[in-house]
Amino acid sequence: MKKLNILILTLLVSLYGLAQQTPAPKQTNAYSIEGATLHMGNGNVIKNSLIMFDNGKITFIGSAMMKIARQGEVIDAKGKHVYPGFIAPNSTLGLVEVDAVRASDDEDEIGAMNPHVRSIIAYNTESKVVESMRPNGVLMAQITPRGGRISGTSSIVQLDAWNWEDAIIKEDDGIHLNWPRAYSRGRWWLGEPMVLTENKNYSKEVDELKNYFAENKAYQAGNTSPKDIPFDALQGLINGNKTLYVHVDNEKGITDAINFAKAQNIKKTVIVGGYEANNVTDLLKENNVPVLLQRVHSLPNSGDDDYDLPYKLATQLVEAGVLVGLENAGDMERMNTRNLPFLAGTTVAYGLTKEQALSLITYNTAKILGIDDTVGSLEVGKDATLFISEGDALDMRTNKLTKAFIQGRDISLETHQTELAKRYSEKYKKQ
């Protein structure tokens, strides 16, 4: 029994060491942050600002010069900057912990048509990868499934929670469709030439989608017994409760996807990826279709493209009047999500103002995801989800957070990485 007790104690200590930082408790005391440059996320900036919040909501925004009683704890942020929490859309955060460990990978399901698969129930709030987002200001994410033709349903969470129920900002916000590829590139590992070739099955694959939605329409119009769970999940696209997120890059695919959504009477459509969206800006604006643009730090897809096309795509779309947000899907996407603010920073070097770039990962993304009534910008009545940085949050050299709040809760900025940094810095100080 003594050995068994020691073993259990050892396991508990080990599990405690593996768990992430304890989520912050609900806000009970008010806060006033004064003296900082306030970046509201909607394009407005207030220098020498005063922002106050209580019970998780922003109660006042104005100038620190105003003679008004400060609420609760006063934080002196002179020389610093305050930003709304950054939002990472189209993310698999919390669905995979270690790529090489199959038991920790829960990002997709077997089958092609899975509109009923809900990613949120697989979301791991104890993920060490998730907690590593917060020190860079990424405080919210859209947890998105992968795989198949219809991957499933995403949900939007805040990144400091005990469980997925606590984490939810918007549950089952949309369904994700991987549009058929009109063209494909040769597979180099099989010795195929690395050139674009036409997908001869493209029309067939599109027809399969049309037939699937036609079957859903027939099901909804008839006797819905026995219950068809996948078709029931699609109903949210028709009544406007869910958004259709179409993952597609090429011009033909974007055009066909928009026309498909119109034909199916889908109320809200978003293009995800959108590498060639700059070629169809009129179509996007005419149909009020926003774009969650692919990772800015990418190589061009074609030898005929400008070498810096991925860097300047956001500017081209913004200047054309398209609503744009940034996403970060791709290689090492979960770990690289922490670099989301620096993707936005790169767009500043290619034509956007800093406030326009900030909107790409705050206000614009919130509008695209349908959560701009509570987050995305710093405004009275919205959630107090924000952070204080010593410098420009879009610059990796100066984005150093000193405080962060989610719904008014003073959250921890410690992670496994910060603990290691402290440990080794102490080691080398002694040498």
Image (cartoon, rainbow, N blue to C red):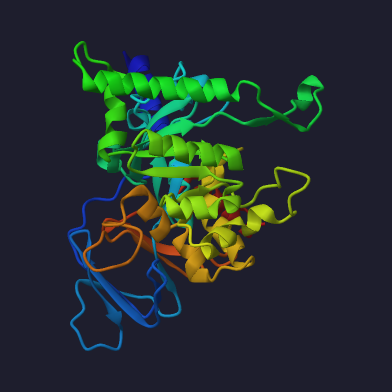
Q: Position of residue 100 (x, y in %)?
A: 58, 25
- Point out residue 223 in the picture as x, y percentages from the top left corner: 18, 15
What residue appears at the point 21 percent right and 64 percent down from the top-left corner?
381
Residue lying at the far top of the rendered structure: 226
Q: How many marks?
A: 0
Question: Viewer-proximal residue, 410 or 373?
Answer: 373
For this view, does 249 lie left or right of residue 20?
right
Asked if residue 386 is positioned above or below residue 337 in the image, the reply reads below
Work out whether residue 88 can be spotted. yes
Percent x, y of residue 403: 38, 63
Q: Is residue 16 visible?
A: no
Q: Where is residue 260 in the image (x, y as percent from the top left)?
A: 44, 34
- Quarter containing the C terminus: bottom right
Residue 130 vs residue 28, the one in the foreground: 130
Above or below, comparing residue 38 to residue 90 in the picture? below
The quarter in which the N terminus is drawn is top left
| Quadrant position of residue 113 | top left
403 relative to 193 in the view: left or right: left
Q: Residue at 36%, 22% (x, y): give it.
A: 214
Horizontal arrangement in the rendering, residue 173 relative to residue 100 (left or right): left
Quarter assignment of residue 219 = top left
